[in-house]
Amino acid sequence: MLHARLFKETAKFREHHFQPIKAGLASIPEEKPREMQWKAYLDGNPAIDRPLFVQFCANDPTELLDAARYVQPFCDAIDLNLGCPQGIARKGKYGAFLQEDQDLIYRLINSLHRELDVPVTAKIRILETKEQTLEYAKRVLSAGASILAVHGRHREQKGHKTGLADWTVLRYLRDNLPPDTVLFANGNILRHEDISTCLDKTGADGVMSAEGNLCDPTIFSESPAVGQEDREYWRGKNGKGGYRMDAVFRRYLDVLYQYVLEKPPPERKPLFALFDRTMVDTNETVIASVDDQSDGSPPDGPPPAKKQKRETKQPRTTSPNLLAIQPHLFRLLRPLVSKHTHVRDALAKSHGSNMAAYENVLQLVEKATQEGLLDYEAHPENYEEREEPLEPTRPEESTDVDYLDYESSLAAVRACKRPWWVCQPYVRPLPREALDKGSLTLSKKDRQKLEEDKAKAAQTQAQSSAREELDVADGMEKAEMPKEAMVCG
């Protein structure tokens, strides 16, 4: 998401956040898009980065339009973010904090719709009721939005209160908006399998993923058939599998070498696979424990002098592609670095354009992955135990939890859990679990709402019991109450 006012006013902000051509965007491009293709660099490059939607946040139609004119030659659509729930959005009055001012939202979208040569799209969050959300969606579409993306969470659902996205509201929108409306669903996409489930439950035309995609960049990739696994994909004895972290790490660095640094990646040995064990043993190159080295430095020889350290200090970089490496890798490697803390420490010391440091971290990750693969092969029962559901947060809870259960994240943890060297999503505890653990404290307003929700639930349960008694009295089969179409995430 780009801040429209900053993007319009500051050339350095544009240079740091959008790089369609190497020369930068000192002014609004006057050339036609086809005439600029030969200058293409990264963002919007027809060979590698299309289709591309550029998302802005804004609260002024003129500023938004001026910012959009900088990027329209390099993209396929301009998107207005009306879903950001963060405190900075509240302070700046943009994102989800515009939803009370739908007249302003209309002007923002309609200005782009009338003045730009590319389509306009918008992303919203659901409102208090599905009927209010429907009217909101109609308003956005009437302003000229060609695609409507809907995050099935309320504005207040963030942090420990994130909870679940409500797919039933998206289904309601699908059934009540014009049939030709292009609808994207957002929320609850933890695994590749959730994509088809979401499309089926909501009737949406596509899905979006944010946090799930950061933790597992392969979320949109198909798994290879059983027996067709290569060095990049791992499948366990229970049939569960996923792409290996060392493989995804390698691909990430290779993309940076090829398109950002524009040089070939260094030569590396093939990724370890179990069928390499004979070769490794024969050549006596079995690695030592990864815990033998705290930061990946050579085990022998004195540390470099201070003067030498200063001479080898890497220059600072302003490239957004390089500055993002470390936070991206912490997301990807979260399960691995929680076990191998020396990898975490080495990654924490890696910054900016120091690709040698990241190559060192990659070697540590590859060694850890090799140890993990060999340990799983020797002791698979240890990993099966680790994939068991967590203990319930309340004594009365059963561990036999449906994956659609929105009172517990246990089933989601069980479904998503993989060995620590395999890409996997981060499953947030649900708000009620966070309350039980003391990591979330409710405000007076939230406590009152919780009591109201409990009262409604008790009333619904009483009505259900009364219906069952009537069915039994009439000699009819027991009535089943349908569950809401939700998954944990």
Image (spheres, helix red, strand yellow):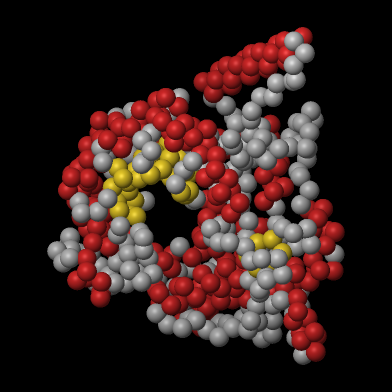
Q: Taking 22 as reference, is 337 above or below it?
A: above
The percent position of residue 313, horizontal first and vertical second, equals 46, 77
Q: Residue at x 29, y 29 (%)?
A: 101
Name which quarter of the figure residue 129 lies in.
top left
Residue 189 shows in this picture:
yes
Say left or right for 329 vs 244: left
The percent position of residue 107, horizontal first and vertical second, equals 22, 37
* Residue with the most extreme front position: 475
Report the number of discs: 0
Question: Which quarter of the rendered picture does the C terminus lie within?
Answer: top right
Say left or right for 349 vs 398: left
Say left or right for 176 vs 216: left
Residue 451 shows in this picture:
no
Q: Taking 121 as reference, is 453 above or below it?
A: above
Q: Nearer the viewer, residue 294 or 454?
A: 454
Q: Residue at x 74, y 35 (%)?
A: 393
Q: Taking 19 as reference, is 460 above or below it?
A: above
* Residue with the most extreme bottom position: 283
Q: Nearer the viewer, residue 123 or 118?
A: 118
The percent position of residue 201, horizontal first and vertical second, equals 55, 39
Q: Residue at x 49, y 65 (%)?
A: 325
Name which quarter of the figure residue 180 lies in.
top left
Name which quarter of the figure residue 335 lies in.
bottom right
The percent position of residue 136, horizontal first and vertical second, equals 35, 30
Q: Nearer the viewer, residue 319 or 304?
A: 319
Q: Nearer the viewer, residue 460 or 28?
A: 460
Q: Residue at x 43, y 68 (%)?
A: 322
